[in-house]
Image (cartoon, rainbow, N blue to C red):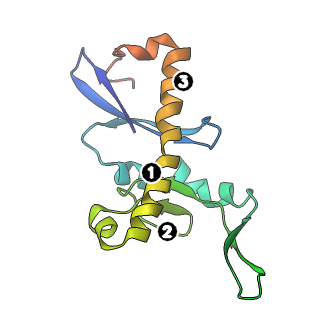
């Protein structure tokens, strides 16, 4: 999530972005007031309506999850998913980071949350790349209140 301030109207706007593992912007939802929560923006977004069909085009990945006593590897098929923060609902296609109370309950959850949080740095990094490439995003953007 990225906030844009319009100094002419003192209006804070929210920009909700989806970034892939290569730090490319896949989807943007722009124009919601800054007071609106991420979950609400997501539930009304265009991507929410089509993401299951979009993810169905991505193949499943096999992930090693352990080994049998005889040495054979145990693997599990992992479906494609969107990684989000704990403001969103955790579903089959939307994996969220854990809340603080859940992290404190288990060291395994704490470690998994650290890995999930590390993967989310791609979003922050993508915004950094965007700001470096297009210098206009380094300053406050002025826009009309009526035509955002």
Q: Residues within 10 Å of mark 1 (few under 14, many from 20)?
A: some
Q: Which residue is label 3 attached to?
A: 129
Q: Position of residue 138 (x, y in %)?
A: 41, 15
| Circle 1 SS class | helix
Q: Position of residue 80 (x, y in %)?
A: 65, 60
Residue name at image x 22 percent, y 19 percent: 9
Left or right position of 60 against 11: right
Residue name at image x 52 percent, y 48 percent: 119
Q: Nearer the viewer, residue 9 or 2?
A: 2
Q: Which residue is label 1 attached to?
A: 117
Q: Which residue is label 2 attached to?
A: 91
Residue name at image x 73 percent, y 64 percent: 60
Closer to the observer: label 1 or label 3?
Answer: 1
Which circle's residue, 2 or 3, is located before the other in the chain?
2
Which circle's residue, 2 or 1, is located before the other in the chain?
2
| Circle 2 SS class | loop
Q: On screen, 69 above or below 38? A: below
Q: Nearer the viewer, residue 125 or 19?
A: 125
């Amino acid at each position: 999530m990225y906030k844009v301030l319009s100094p002419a109207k003192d209006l804070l706007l929210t920009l909700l972005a989806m970034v892939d593992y290569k730090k490319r912007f896949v989807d943007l939802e722009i124009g919601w007031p800054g007071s609106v929560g991420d979950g609400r923006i997501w539930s009304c977004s265009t991507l929410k309506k089509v993401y299951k069909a979009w993810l169905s085009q991505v193949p499943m990945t096999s992930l090693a999850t352990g080994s049998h006593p005889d040495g054979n590897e145990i693997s599990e098929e992992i479906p494609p998913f969107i990684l989000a923060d704990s403001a969103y609902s955790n579903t089959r296609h939307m994996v969220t980071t854990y809340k603080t109370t859940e992290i404190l309950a288990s060291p395994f959850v704490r470690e998994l949350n650290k890995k999930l949080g590390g993967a989310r740095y791609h979003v922050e990094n993508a915004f950094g790349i965007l700001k470096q490439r297009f210098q206009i995003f380094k300053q406050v953007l002025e826009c009309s209140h009526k035509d955002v």
